[in-house]
Amino acid sequence: MLPYPAPTTREEKMKLVAQIKDRLLQLHGDAILAIGLYGSLAQGIDGPYSDIELRVITKDGFSLPGHEFIYPPFKIEIGMKQKREAMRSAATVDDSWAIKAGAYAHLQAIYDPDRLLDEIRTRPMHISDEAIRDVMREFMIWEPYETMGKIRNNKLAGNHGYLALGAKDLAWQSAKLIGLANKTFYTTRARTYEESLQMPSRPSGYDELIELVTRGQLHDSELVYERCEHLWTGLNEWFGEMGIEYKLDKLPF
């Protein structure tokens, strides 16, 4: 087994975080408004192989390049955003909102003299129900609808090897929709399925497909296909209950 990725303690990670903070401030001074830690390390649920994720907020008009690199035994990701861009990005809703919003909502201040991160942390929830519904409508067309078409095509063609991949895609896409519908973001990507099953609003057929996906029981292609069809029916019924119509009765032009 290769010695990397290598395990490190939380204390070792936080010591490097402090060094990075000091280095950035030494180089750029008051052009940096805030430095925040996010991800599992910020939430206190990191493991020995977790990476270090930092978000740096700079003054408007002062741009710095981001960095993602290996500095053995650590992996570090440093995102750089100007203040106006950070505020806008934190309040943006798209199909990955439930996966990515925590990167702002869970920011832990490492350097924040003016408490800017307090405001940024609240921004992900400043999204309207209408915006969420619009994103769900668009995403249903872009991903689940297309995925289900591929699943049916490959079933008809006898390419049963694709069905497991299609099932994973449909499950992940549905989890993103569930987070949006419940206006709830996931703590980490790794816990998405676990947390989605606890949310009150979710389509019928979802739990059953997730059971197969999370247990790796995707060898029975007929069962996998059946569960995908059940979830697809459930997704459409669920959209109907929410009053989200994604099909048109006339050309849009």
Image (cartoon, rainbow, N blue to C red):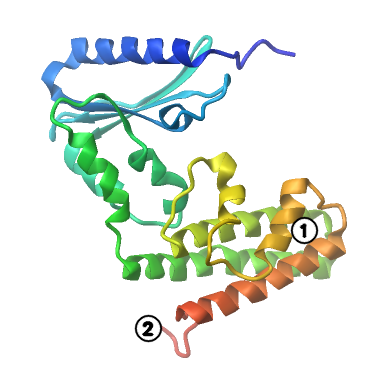
Q: Distance between the Cα atoms at labels 1 and 2?
A: 35 Å
> For residue 159, which quarter of the picture?
bottom right
Looking at the rendered structure, the secondary structure element under dot 1 is helix
Residue 96 shown left or right of residue 118 in the figure: right
| Residue type indicated by callout 1 | Leu
Residue 70 position within the rendered picture, expressed as x and y whole percent measured from the top left: 49, 16
The image quarter in which residue 11 lies = top left
The residue at 39%/56% (across/down) is 94
Most extreme residue toward the bottom is 249
Please tell me which residue is depicted at 66% across the width and 68% down the height of the picture: 148
Q: Which mark is residue 5?
A: none
Residue 253: mark:
2
Q: Which residue is mark 1?
A: 163
Front residue of 13 and 90: 13
Q: Residue at x 45, y 62 (%)?
A: 182
The relative height of residue 94 versus residue 131 in the rendered view (above or below) is: above
Query: Could you tell me residue 116's position as x and y percent?
Result: 18, 35
Left of 253 or right of it: where is 99?
A: right
Q: Amino acid at mark 2?
A: Phe
Label 2 crowd bin: few (<14), some (14–19), many (20+), radius 10 Å: few
Q: Nearer the viewer, residue 140 or 46?
A: 46
Find residue 113 and report its horizontal and vertical position in percent: 15, 25
Asked whether the beta carbons under mark 1 and mark 2 sit within 8 Å of each other, the answer is no
Q: Quadrant of the N terminus?
A: top right
Give the x, y percent position of residue 144.
59, 65
| Tag nearer the camera, 1 or 2 | 1
Secondary structure under tag 2 reads loop
Q: How dense is the environment of label 1, judged by Cα within 10 Å: few (below 14), some, or many (20 and up)?
A: many
